[in-house]
Amino acid sequence: MIDRNSLASLLFELRWTGKEAQHRETFLAPRANFWRDLFPERLTQTLVGKSEGDCIELTFPPGEAVPLRRNDYILAMQWSEFRGGYGSPVARPRFGRFYPWGLLKNLAGIFPDDLRPFRVSGTGADGFIADLNHPLSGYSLELSVTVQETQVQKAERGGRVIDWMSEILDQGPGMQARCDGKPTDFNEPGAYQRQDDSEDTLFYTKPRLIGHIDRQANSMLENIYGGILPECGRVLDIMSSVESHLPPRRTWHVTGLGMNREEMAGNAALHHFVVHDLNAHPALPLPDASFASAICSLSVEYLIDPVRVFREAARILVPGAPFAVSFSNRWFPPKTTMLWPSLSEFERVGLVLDYFIRSDCFRDLRTFSARNRPRPSDDSHYPQQRTSDPLYVVWGYRI
């Protein structure tokens, strides 16, 4: 049972609704220290007395979990007052995008290493508007917390103080929403070029029989897909490889469409497969309304004409069918688009949402994120990386 001297493993789930989509963010606090760490007092009071397996629900109105919007945090800046940088050379910030505060010049108390995000909420001939408010400012937030484990606090009381709400809220949630419902300007020059612009068939000639996320993240992805896809029917695995990340023991008939025959031949989830290069030929070689669901796992960052591919995915789906797109923070650098690594992780969620919106073929858009789970100790990247690969999923339903 939790008291004010406890250690506890807490799973946080944040839910909020934007103009374009519904969002769900999950974050694990593996050793929350109720004596030392920081929580909103109302959250502490609600958790005290709870035991393993208990779940509490709270709603935070605008201004409680994150500060209310401040007009003095909306600044008119000259183009010359932007430093450039942030992942790739940026001559001028673009509408709707996020950049670190440290790229702003001539502001008291802001230093070049300040990584707090600001949003460009306007551009003009002479400059831009920098909105320094929190990305979730103005939103009502629903928070559930599940107690996974409790421990008695030992006598040692040193260590780092962690503000858990800041850990959850200040790492990007909110950055996937559009600015005032207006499209984000992702169309910077060379956005869909790659380091290696040679034919993809050459790059994918050699099979890569490896997993692209760790086992913990893969299990999470299987659970998410299991909750999105209908129980039976034909599933199209777009940009398929050796793994489909689908939960086992389902009555699906799975078709893979990918670049390497040997990889897909080794995928136990596939009933059959088609070798096809979507960057050379975005049209899917499949009939209209022939699938009950579709997925694209850990590969969307390689598409050079993504909106057309999303429209093709809609074409082969029956009305009401889900299309789910997942990704993490790992990829093959030579073949990812130049835009992708220049974005923060939650901006990539916004970019994939943008593909769904611009395709004009899907409704009821949703996003999911999972962060800060433990990495399995037998994983090849452990102990250098002790947390699991983050997971992001965006999905919608065929109109």
Image (spheres, rainbow, N blue to C red):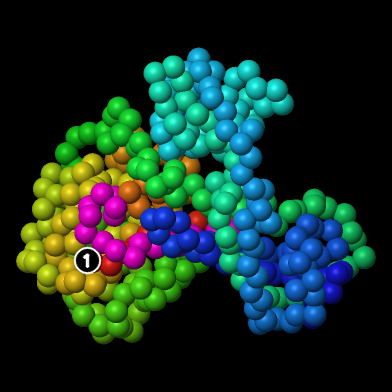
Q: Residue at x 14, y 65 (%)?
A: 316
Task: Using the image as rendered, state which of residue 50 and residue 75 is in the foreground.
Answer: 75
Label 1 crowd (10 A; few <14 / some 14-19 / many >=20): some
Disc 1 target residue: 399
Q: Position of residue 193 (x, y in %)?
A: 26, 33
- Residue 191 lies, with reference to residue 222, above or below; the image says above
**Residue 383 in sight in this render:** no
Q: Is residue 33 magenta?
A: no
Left or right of residue 60, residue 301 in this image: left
- Kind of residue sitting beneath label 1: Ile
- Residue 335 lies, with reference to residue 271, above or below; the image says above
Q: Is residue 370 magenta?
A: yes
Q: Residue at x 80, y 51 (%)?
A: 160
Residue at the extreme right of the image, as rendered: 155
Count every numbered label the image shows and give the total: 1
Identify the image quadrant of the N terminus.
bottom right
Q: Residue at x 52, y 61 (%)?
A: 16
Left or right of residue 114, residue 273 in this image: left
Identify the image quadrant of the C terminus.
bottom left
Q: Position of residue 13 (x, y in %)?
A: 57, 67
User: Which residues fall within the magenta stretch?
Assistant: 355-381
- Residue 182 lies, with reference to residue 101, above or below; the image says below
Q: Residue at x 29, y 53 (%)?
A: 357
Picture quadrant where residue 386 is located: bottom right
